[in-house]
Amino acid sequence: MLGFLRRKKTYGPFVYLTEPTFLYHTRTERAIVEIIEEKLNSNNILVPSKYGMRDTSDRIKEAEYLVAVAPLGKFTSLVGREVKLAQELGVKIFTLLIARKENELVYLWVEGVPEEVEWLSPEETLEFTKTFLNSEFMDYLRKGLFLGSRKREW
């Protein structure tokens, strides 16, 4: 009768997801979690947005897999730091390269870290984040406060 109060049963290996903070609580993040569930047959995923801005990197050592998200083929400084930590700890790494084509998420699932991924410094990450936030939220600031914004790429 009160099925909505039941907790969803977790299954599969523990997966640590590392993603840029600008993807927190977006439809892209939900799609990423679905991709991980499909590819690794697990819903036992540490999604960092559920922890706010707290550092969860101490949980990497418990993980069987680390999935690193690279929007437009770039690792932000946070993601890069966590990937290096996972490499040191011997955790198996998967890279999820993502991009948007119109209203569709395009992704490439790669085992390990591809050589073509660009590792951003903290300064480059700041510029990259500004580019994302400006394109995504300028429409919201112009129209969204009063009329609602329909433009949502990520």
Image (tube, rainbow, N blue to C red):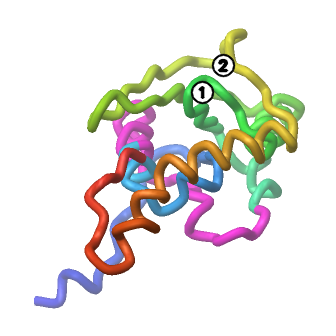
SS label for mark 1:
strand
**Disc 1 marks which amino acid?**
Phe
Residues 47 and 76: in front is 76
Q: Position of residue 71 (x, y in %)?
A: 56, 33
- The outermost residue toward the top is 115
Horizontal relation, residue 86 to residue 133: left or right = right
Any magenta on residue 56? no
Q: Which residue sits at x=86%, y=42%?
A: 123
Q: Is residue 54 above or below residue 22?
A: below
In the drawing, what numbered circle is on residue 126? none
- The vertical placement of 6 against 118, above or below, is below
Q: Residue at x 57, y 53 (%)?
A: 133
Q: Is residue 65 visible?
A: no
Identify the residue at image location x=61%, y=23%.
73
- Which residue is more in the foreground, 4 or 125? 125
Q: Is residue 12 visible?
A: yes
Query: Can you name the residue that lies furthest to the left here?
Result: 1
Is 93 rendered above or below residue 81? above
Q: Which mark is residue 112?
A: 2
Residue 37 appears at what percent x and percent y?
39, 42
Please tell me which residue is depicted at 39% across the width and 32% down the height of the picture: 100
Whether tag 1 and tag 2 are in contact, CB under 8 A, the answer is yes
Q: Which residues are magenta?
A: 32-55
Q: Quadrant of residue 77?
A: top right
Q: Nearer the viewer, residue 76 or 8?
A: 76
Q: Quadrant of the N terminus?
A: bottom left
Please state the horizontal and vertical placement of residue 88, each as a whole percent of the image: 89, 32
Q: Secondary structure at mark 2?
A: loop
Q: Going by the picture, which residue comes out furthest to the front?
A: 142
Circle 2: residue type: Gly
Residue of label 1: 94
